[in-house]
Image (cartoon, grey):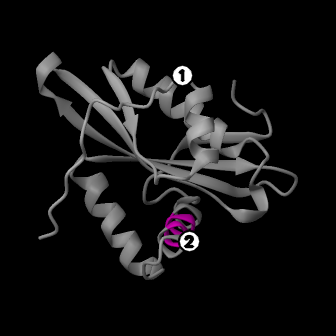
Amino acid sequence: MTDAAFAVSTVRPGDPRWDAHVGLFADYRAHYGQDRDPQQCDGWLRQQLDAGRYRCYLANGGPDGSAGGMANVAISPASIVLSLFWQLRDLYVAPDHRRQGVARALLDVVLADASAAGAHRVSMQTEVGNDQAVALYRSAGFEVVSELTMLNRTL
């Protein structure tokens, strides 16, 4: 159930809340040791949205109505089942909004939108040891997939 104190909706460039989303995305990147550069973040997010590869979500609320968190979703083909899957790529809650239901509110709306769009599944990944995130995702019905091996090659 979504926390009533936080309203979650999609956001795009031109929306008055767009800058808040970009700022939270920049904070998210900084949290993982990347350059915070909001201008670069804005351009990259716009590219993903224009290509139809991303959906951006923003949670507003709390006592001051400020932006409390954001999520970004990549939509990809699920070729084996001839459908689509949504991958929750980024989920970030501002430090002063943590432990208030913001992450769960974002997650609930993403799941509802994916279901309404006919997605076959929603997937995500998180770092080993991020126990709070794993607990949140498991409480929402996600299961750890141990039958897959993730491989990367940096280009």
**Magenta-colored stretch includes residue 27:** yes
- Assess disc 1: are there few (<14), some (14-19) or many (≥20) residues with their C-alpha within 10 Å of its C-alpha: few
Q: Secondary structure at mark 1?
A: loop
Which of pointers 1 and 2 lies earlier in the amino acid sequence?
A: 2
Taking 56 as reference, is 124 above or below it? Answer: above
Image location of residue 30, percent across then percent down: 51, 76
The amino acid beneath tag 2 is: Asp
Taking 68 as reference, is 108 above or below it? Answer: above
Question: How far is the residue under mark 1 from the one under mark 2?
Answer: 28 Å
- Assess disc 2: are there few (<14), some (14-19) or many (≥20) residues with their C-alpha within 10 Å of its C-alpha: many
Direction from residue 97 to residue 155 in the image, left or right: left
Mark 1 touches mark 2? (CB < 8 Å): no
Most prominent secondary structure in the magenta stretch? helix
The amino acid beneath tag 1 is: Gly
Image location of residue 155, percent across then percent down: 11, 70
Quarter of the image where the N terminus is located: top right
In the rendered structure, which segment of residues is drawn in magenta?
Answer: 22-28
Q: Residue 141 — which label?
A: 1
Image location of residue 139, percent across then percent down: 62, 27
Q: How many badges with numbers are in the image?
A: 2
Q: Secondary structure at mark 2?
A: helix
Q: Which residue is mark 2?
A: 27
Taking 109 as reference, is 120 above or below it? Answer: above
Direction from residue 87 to residue 5 in the image, left or right: right
Residue sitting at x 54%, y 53%? 129
Residue sitting at x 69%, y 40%? 7
Is 34 or 66 nearer to us in this picture? 34
Question: Mark 1 or 2, which is nearer the eye?
Answer: 1
Is 54 or 50 nearer to us in this picture? 54
Taking 115 as reference, is 46 above or below it? Answer: below
Image location of residue 131, percent across then percent down: 60, 46
**Magenta-colored stretch includes residue 138:** no
